[in-house]
Image (spheres, rainbow, N blue to C red):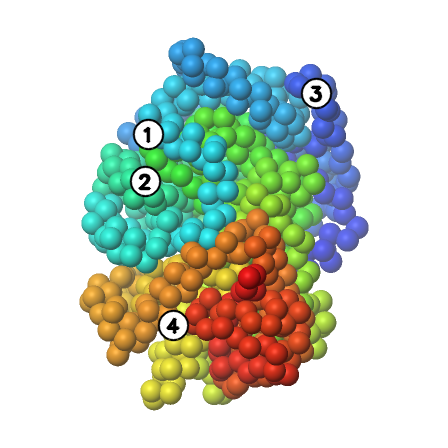
Amino acid sequence: MPDPVQVSLAISEAAKDASPLPVPTPTKAARKPRPAKAAVPSPAGPAQSEPAPTESAAPKAKPAPRKPKAPAAAPATPEVAQEEARPEPAAEPVPPEVPADAPTPPLSSEATLDPRDADTFAIRLERYRADLEGSLRSVYGAEQLVALWPRLEALLRRALAERPADLRRLDEARLLRPDWLQVPEMIGYVAYADRFAGTLEGVGEHLNYLEELGVKYLHLMPLLKPRVGENDGGYAVQDYRAVREDLGSMADLKALASRLRRRGISLELDLVMNHVAQEHGWAVRARAGEQKYRDYFLMFENRDLPDLYERTLPEIFPDFAPGNFTWNDEAQRWVWTTFNSYQWDLNWANPEVFLEFVDIILYLANQGVEIFRLDAIAFIWKRMWTDSQNQPEVHDLTRALRACARIVAPAVAFKAEAIVAPGDLIAYLGRRDHHGKVSDMAYHNSLMVQLWSSLASGNTRLFEQALSAFAPKPTNTTWGMYVRCHDDIGWAISDHDAGMAGTTGPGHRAFLSDFYSGEWPGSFARGQVFQANPRTGDRRISGTAASLAGLEAAQTEEDIDLALRRLRLLHAVTLGYGGVPLIYMGDELALLNDERYLDVPEHAQDNRWLHRPAMDWHKAEERFDVATSSGRMYAALQRLIRARRQLPHLHASIEAQIVPSPNEHTLLFRRDHPLGSMLAMYNFSPEFQPLPAPLLRAIVGDYPRDALSGHEWNLTNPEVALEPYGAYWLIEQTR
Ligand code: GLC
């Protein structure tokens, strides 16, 4: 992902004098103040301003030829712009053959609910009606809402009628335990099914391994049927109702979900919302000229609007997919493609797209998916003169989708994958009237970035600065905490925070890229630069946690020891913060970078595969051998997990607060639980670091217990010392 801070800074410059325009789409997208009561149609009025005069930006380096501009291209008023973008009906629409994998479009079929279900439906609809209607009205306007509503209701009824009995039981259980994602026992594990165990059935054979680690939730990386060939690690989905064939079938997925459930492990899948593969049935039909499906995408006859949009859009993959639009010969249109050219962005301003996704979510929920990772959610709404990320409609749409899920499948939770600037992130857990009504969880990207930043600099000032700027999250939500994931690390560090911490944004970001690519003299890291962008200076980083933390470069026993201490420190922060720790497959065994991706043609261009190694079951067998690095890593992680599970203080409803530390190498967090306080202390330097005991004593009393070592501490002395890369969870002992 790009560095959201840099991107947003660049955008704010460009957007200074411009008011946002609505996305030019066939549907009305004007936002209106939300009336207090139910669906009463009222005309939606455009609130638009004039765009800058058309002037062609540099052509994008897409392989396609640039189309000549339409004759007499009117310097568009917004209304004209909207007209222009409206996909024209093809002269003679050729009805394509419906591909075998085309989605079933049963959007209007009614289902009769038995009296008990009808009652359940009525109660839940009553509960969520205001959320649903309010959000849909905001996004689509009152008129569209009225047209949409009966179809939506029919769809929800049908999904409820089809909800299997065991999942209904889970729904009931979750309604009684709404904090199920927030409890300290919640430990996540993230794996590629094929790289972990070959197939879905294979995954089912390794459940003891997961259980032994304490895993309560399993995120299986994209496994819905992707396009053949390059597919961005599965994030180019061709069919949301089929499983990648080499992994198994939908029946296998359902069976695995229920096996996991019996062990108390929740299954998470990716829901790719921003785009589909160009081979998806919708895109196939759009290309062939079917107007209904053209309206599912953002297509443009000429470069006028794309050029205007490009002025403020970032490039996500500047190396291998520059620009945001791709020319398609068959459709004779430019197609919006934020990511790769084969990933076609969806037009969420079209309520049909919303209905399709409600249907997909409920279909998958009824197969047993409990958590949806809302992939690239920040991008789903486009607006002229902005970076087309984090737009208010994104949150309205999430609130509406969540309300639908709560009505049919209250066991289901949403996790937002919004790798955005800190100031934008909190909105994914809900602000103002969306408070606690959007995603249940969001990745804490900022904290992850700060972990690596402090590890490189040995200094925690920036970490403190960045984290203390975070607004508290809604008490019914949680953070997804992670050291590493399948993506690169982008240095989302704002110039302001860097300045406050005594450095500069560009300088520090450049240092981090140098450090983690191993270019910095004396660096212990062995990562690689991903998507260097000379325009912004961005250089993101690929590499496994172990390789970035020094294990790959380690020459001596002492180096190995230091690398393992660093890894333990990073995991301790993520496990001790109060969100859901998401352990990335292989990190429990400190797996190193794997260069073999270079031999796979469809991966070779993308060095994120460096940190997506296959599970090393040989190392896994050695996990109890503490003479090995893997064994030491595993033991350390298991200990952290066990300690975490015993600590009510780590319930996510309690906020972690930064305690400004007098020692710039150390980081202190306090969590104040009714049972007593917890103080987490971390040393990011390779030397012992002193801290004044009275500061700590004021939080956890004279004799706290360290939940990690089990030792009681005496804080009546004037000073304490933290070990090199030491981690401590001090718990106030209330006698
Ligand atoms: C998310 C995924 C990333 C993918 C992108 C496009 O950011 O984590 O791997 O490339 O979405 O779907």
Q: Which-is-in-front pick, marks 4 and 1?
A: 1
| Residue 224: quarter of image | top left
On screen, residue 453 above or below 426: below
On screen, residue 2 above or below 416: below
Which of the marked residues, 2 or 4, is nearer the chain's N terminus?
2
Dot 3 falls on a residue whose secondary structure is loop
Residue appearing at x 23%, y 41% in the figure: 248
Q: How far is disc 3 from disc 1 in space, using C-alphas?
A: 36 Å
On screen, residue 226 above or below 421: above
Residue denoted by label 1: 166
Instruction: Please state which amino acid type lies under the numbered disc 4.
Output: Ala
Are the residues at dot 2 and dot 1 in contact (C-beta closer than 8 Å)? yes
Q: How far is disc 2 from disc 3 in space, using C-alphas?
A: 39 Å
Q: How far is disc 4 from disc 1 in space, using C-alphas?
A: 40 Å
Return the residue nearer the eye: 324 or 254: 254
Return the residue nearer the eye: 572 or 27: 572
Instruction: Please state which amino acid type lies under the numbered disc 3.
Output: Lys
Crowd tier of the residue under label 3, counting other residues whose Cα lies within 10 Å: few below 14, some 14–19, many 20 or above: few
Residue denoted by label 2: 261
Return the residue nearer the eye: 627 or 527: 627
Which of the marked residues, 3 or 1, is nearer the chain's N terminus?
3
Residue denoted by label 3: 37
Residue appearing at x 57%, y 49% in the figure: 653
Q: Which-is-in-front pick, marks 3 and 1?
A: 1
Are the residues at dot 4 and dot 1 in contact (C-beta closer than 8 Å)? no
Crowd tier of the residue under label 4, counting other residues whose Cα lies within 10 Å: few below 14, some 14–19, many 20 or above: many
Which of the marked residues, 4 or 3, is nearer the chain's N terminus?
3
Which of the marked residues, 2 or 1, is nearer the chain's N terminus?
1
Label drawn at residue 647: none
Residue denoted by label 4: 546
Crowd tier of the residue under label 1, counting other residues whose Cα lies within 10 Å: few below 14, some 14–19, many 20 or above: few
